[in-house]
Image (tube, rainbow, N blue to C red):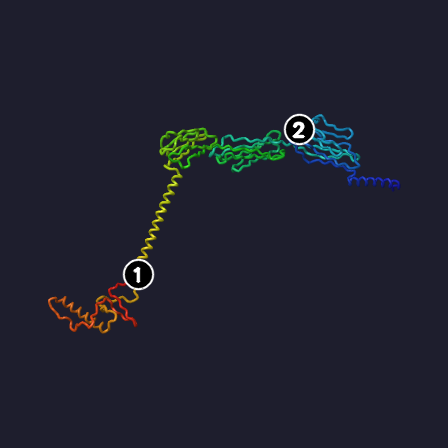
Amino acid sequence: MLPSSHWSYLGRRGKVAFIHLLLSITGVWCSQVVVPQRVSAVLGKNVTLECRVEVGANLTLTQSSWERRLPSGSVTVAVYNPRFGISIPPEFGNRLYFRSPSSHDATIILENVGFADVGIYTCKVATFPLGNNQASTTVNVLVEPKVYVAAGSAALIDGGNETVVATCIAERARPPAEVSWESNIFGQSEVQLVDDVNGTTSTQVRYLWQPTRHVQGHTLTCVVRHPALQNDFRIPYQLNVQFAPDISVVGYDGDWYVGRENAQMACKANSNPPAHHFRWIRLDSEMPEGVEIMNSTLVFMRPLQRNDSGVYRCEVANDINLRSRDVRILIQDQSQAERSNSIAVAGAVMGAVLALFLIAVFIIVILTARKAPPPAFTDKVIDLPPTHKPPPPYCERAPAVPLGVHASQVAWLCQNLSAERRYELTDRQHPLKTRPGPPGRQAPSQQLPRLEWVGHQSGTERVYINHREHYV
C-alpha cells in the first residue's frame, strides 16, 4: 500500500495531464499545418507551395522547413528560424525562396520548374513544447502545349474529292491536350496521338471536307483545352477554296435602240484565284466597226445601229479554268418609252372608235323599237299552243258563216254546197253531158258572202275560227 504522500504526488501529476489534454482539445496548446494535396506546376514557370501554420496561443514556433522525398531519402530544401533566419541549400539558392516567412506562413516559391522538380514535398513545423508537426503535397509538372494550325497538303478546289482542309496540332503536352474543330460546313475530324520525350504527347486533329465554292471565306476554329492553360486556346482558320470564274454581264438592259449613245457592256467575274484573261467576241458575225474592248468592257464608240443586233460572248479565264457567258443583243427601232407611248395612243384611238360604235348601235336599237307597230292579237296567240282540238280536214269542214246568220240559213247553205260538189264531180266525169243545175237551188232573200269562218258552239257563246289558219 502506497503512502499518502505518494498518492498526493500522483494526484498532482494527473491534474497537470488533464489540464494539458484540455488545452490541447481547446487549441491553446495545439498546432496545425495546412498544405494542398496536389500542386500542378507548368514547365518553365513558377510554382507556389502553400503552407499555412496554425499555432496555439501558448505555443512558440521554433522553426519551419520544407523537405523533399527522394529515392535515397529526404533532403531539406528550405529552413526558416525566427531567431537565426532563412537557410536554403545552394542547389536551390537561385530559384527558391519564402514568400512571407512568419510564425503562421511557411509558403515557398520555386521558379523555372523542370521535370526534375516532380515529387513529394513536406512542410514541417517545430513548436515548443509540443514538438514537430507536418503535412505533405505532391508536385506534378504540366507541359503547356505548343498550338498551331497547318494547312492541308493539297489546294481546295471546288467540286474536288474529300481532302484534308487543315490540321490543328497541340504539340508536346503533358498530359495530352484536348483538341477539336468548330465548324458549320459538316466535315469530319480525325484524331492522332504521338508520344514524345519526357512523358509528353502531341495531339493532331485533321479536318476532312469536300470543297465547294459556296463556303469560300468561311472560318474554321481550332479549340485546345489543357490544365496548363487558364482559358481555352482558339485559333481561327479561313477557308481558301479555288474555283473557276463565275461570269455576269452588266450594261445591257433590253432597251437598246437605233441611235442610242454611250452603250457598253461590262464582263464581271467572281473567281479564286482572280481572273487574268478577258475577251469579247461576236458569234453570229464579225465584230462591228466602231466597237472597242477596254479591259473587260465592250464599248460602242458610236450611236447604235440596226446591224449591232447579235450574240456576243465574254470569255474569262483564271488558273483553274476558262468560262464564258453569251448575251443576245436586240436593237429596236424605238426606245421602250416611245413604244409605250405609241401603244398607249393606239389603244386610246381604238377605245374611242369602239365607244362610238357602241353608242351608234344603241341609238339604232332605240329608234327601231319606237317605229315598230305593236304586235296584233293573233301574233300573240299564234305562238301559243292550241287550247282546242285541231279542226277536221278541209273537205269535211262546214262552210264559213258570217256572224249574225240564222241556223236555218246555215243548213240551207250547207245543202247547197254539197249539191254543187256533186254536180262538179259529175261534170268532170262527163264533160260533154249538160246537166241542169241542182234542184231547188235558189238564192235566199239575202245572198251570204262566202267566208272562211266556221262557227262552233261553246256553251252559251259561239266562236268562229278561220279554217285556213294553221296552228302550231
Q: Is residue 192 something one can see in this rendering?
A: no
- Amino acid type assigned to the residue bearing label 2 in the image: Asn
Q: Locate residue 289, reporting x and y percent.
A: 37, 29
Q: Is residue 378 above or below residue 111?
A: below
Which numbered disc, 1 or 2, marks the residue closer to the eye?
1
Mark 2 and mark 1 in contact (Cβ < 8 Å)? Answer: no
Q: Quadrant of residue 77?
A: top right
Image quadrant in which the N terminus is located:
top right
At x 73%, y 27%, the residue is: 88
Position of 138 with respect to 179 (left or right) is right
Q: Is residue 189 above or below residue 432?
A: above
Q: Nearer the viewer, residue 356 or 301?
A: 356
Label 1: which secondary element: loop
Q: Earlier in the sequence, mark 1 or mark 2?
A: 2
Position of 302 with respect to 66 (left or right) is left
Q: Locate residue 329, reporting x and y percent.
A: 39, 35
For this orientation, the residue located farthest to the left is 432
Which residue lies under the disc numbered 1? 375
Q: Locate residue 401, reporting x and y percent.
A: 23, 69
Q: Locate residue 83, reporting x and y percent.
A: 78, 29
Which residue lies under the disc numbered 2? 112
Label 2: which secondary element: loop
